[in-house]
Image (cartoon, rainbow, N blue to C red):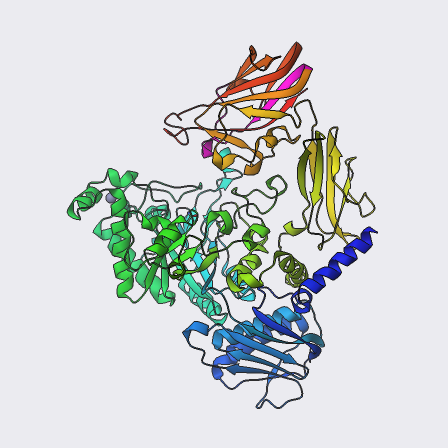
Amino acid sequence: MRKLFSFICLALVNLLFSQTSLEWPLIPLPNHYEVKSGSFLLSPKTELFFEATKLSNHLTYFNASLQSQCGFQLTRSSDSIRPSVIILELVNSGPNSAEAYSLEISPNKIKIKGDTAGVFYGLQTLKQLINDQSGYQIKLPCLKIQDQPRFIWRGMHLDVCRHFFSPSFVKRYIDFLAMYKLNTFHWHLTEDQGWRIEIKKYPLLTQVGAFRKGSMVGKYSDSNYDTLSYGGYYTQEDIKEIVNYAQQRQITIVPEIEMPGHSQAAIAAYPWLSCSGKKQEVAKGWGVFEDVFCSKDSTFNFLKDVLDEVMTLFPGKYIHIGGDECPKTRWKDCAKCQALIKKEHLKDEHELQSYFIKRIETYVNSKGRQIIGWDEILEGGLAPNAAVMSWRGEEGGIAAAKQKHKVVMSPGTHCYFDHYQASPADEPLAIGGFTPLEKVYGYEPLPKSLTADEAKFIMGAQANVWTEYIITEKQLEYMSMPRMSALAEVLWTYPENKNETNYLIRLQKHFALLERQKVNFAKGIYQVNFKIRNDLDAKQLYLELQANPYLGEIHYTTDGSEPQSQSPLYTTPILLSTDMKIKSTLFYAGQAKTRSLTRSYQINKATNKSIQFKKEPSKYYNPGNFVMVNGESAKLPRINDQWLAWSGDDMELILDLQKSEDIQSVEIGFLKEELNWIYLPKEVILFVSNDGKKFTELQHLNSKQLTNERSALFQLKNTTAQYLKIIAKNKGKIASGFPGACEQAWLFSDEIKVK
Ligand code: ACM
Ligand code: ZN
């Protein structure tokens, strides 16, 4: 019966979406297509015809991939009248449709038409249609595609400073961008932890600045370092080769030279660039550092020299000048910076930062180029022609568009691929955050608050891959793939043509190509999602196991064993009436699609009971009171929808057990994450009552008495009560010398267990 149901579902989906989009793994989905009957056989007998010499690179490129996948190449024919032919036709499309293309496949002929970029994209579509087929008989469906991207900035960023990636791997990364018709590679080349671009005039930038004497190991909060020399850089020859490689793939590289902050590696090479002139080391740890470029003339001269070489190497319109996270501490104490503030009649150090960027912009503009910077460049006034990359949410991008400045959206909420993409407890260590594939796919780069005219300033979006926790090439692939494909569809395919289930089905087929290319992509789409539901009337808890039904069926166990295809099939929610440990896996055609996930539930006297807070949690961390009594303790690393939190305020709650109960123990969880200003409570106090009005204090624990710095456990004797009151005293204003000094501490709490 269940099998029949799955079959009907699949049949319905096939009806719902067009045959092509499902059957052929095209990502991003073309905007207009028509499926025809019949097929074209691509074989060593197929010839390729084009007139424009401009297209010879395309032939070389296409042949290289055909050779490695199928073991043959196409020869160029002198005319288009051949029994099996691919015709590339160059048209001059004009600036607004330079990336448009048409692709028509008929039984004996394939025709791709477009400008240089358009023809390249047509060939990408063809490569995706080949997918994982190999050998001398490649079957391609007859169809007609007319396609053009939605946005002109379709970008991916890569931080090669926190960890260095070899020139050959950078090329592989560029190939991923090309596969998804992305056209901008934002190359983050300088940082506190390493300067990675050779500058001939300042050789110490790489001789000294490209190497650090150790790196952080593990979580930031552990503060562990190794003592290994770590580094690397790209020579100008490497860069020329990579720029050329990208150009052949219709990708513009936007180099980023960070200023005035994130510049400690440059200062390590040339200490006179800083305010104090003191010797510094290339940073070993992650974070934001106080030694930044001093705003004196010699620094500007240095930066002009550096930018001269950068602009010679990178021919694109935009030069990224960073601009983010620049502490003003050193400028406040620097006679030169203060004298400049006075001379230029600037209000403060924020205006000095704005002055700094404007001065650099004037220089870059004088060379016929434009600057782009992180959204902090809005502070103290935007430079007249600057484009803004909005990363701290979309607000910066919205403000810039309203001021008629060009914008690239890259909000941390949807576009940071260093964030977790699946349940953090089951993933390799990452910086934090939670950005699953579906969230990326659902991203809409045009904010609703902009008028149509303002929205024209949004050039597109990009995802950022910061590499503090991304150490190896394999891990970099894991973090960026397949999220890069979701972003590509956001940026290429018009919203009316997008559909998440349709995308997931295409993606599942496209995985075959990634496997063939030995890409270490994440398989989060196959992870079973555990969702607890409470049925308030029946006062019962249920566990729902969720996965996209088109990707497989869920099997689970409750005895701790690994689920097999013969283990119970999940069909309806599982009643949680006693403690349970559930392991679950998605299977397709009897094969496990990924490893199992395990969740434990502890059902106790507090489970599913009602809670009232004296002061509601912060609106930023308030997934509902139920998370405190849902039978599941929040896992670490933190994922926000499992916690309630208060900023500066105490947490005070009353729990109604609904009848008088004998109580042996009460336990409540807290979180310590001081680097994020989350502190344990100073004190936790337990009260009981039988009428909900008059409470008697029973016990209190201070922060040192918490178990594993995680939970307050009260052991009780001869206690009977219906109501519990718990007060957890917030640490309040954070003392100086501690993370978040002078700010209000956060108090995070999760599960209460009463036994
Ligand atoms: C950034 O993530 N600091 C731009
Ligand atoms: Zn200074």
Q: Is residue 15 shown above or below 233?
A: below
- Residue 327: x %, y % from top left: 33, 41
* Residue 141 magenta-highlighted: no
| Horizontal side, residue 330 vs residue 287: left or right | left
Quarter holding the C terminus is top right
* Residue 682 magenta-highlighted: yes
Q: Quadrant of residue 609?
A: top right
| Horizontal side, residue 715 vs residue 727: left or right | right
Q: Is residue 3 shown above or below 715?
A: below
Q: Quadrant of residue 48?
A: bottom right
Range of residues picked out in magenta: 661-683
- Residue 97: x %, y % from top left: 46, 73
- Considering every residue shown, the one lying at the far front of the view is 537
| Horizontal side, residue 300 vs residue 690: left or right | left
Q: Quadrant of residue 320?
A: bottom left
What residue is drawn where x is 75% and y is 34%? 575
State the count of labels: 0
Residue 19 visible in image: yes
Q: Nearer the viewer, residue 193 or 536?
A: 536
- Residue 547: x %, y % from top left: 69, 48
- Residue 334: x %, y % from top left: 23, 40
Q: Nearer the viewer, residue 120 or 615?
A: 615
Residue 157 visible in image: no
What residue is drawn where x is 39% and y is 46%? 192
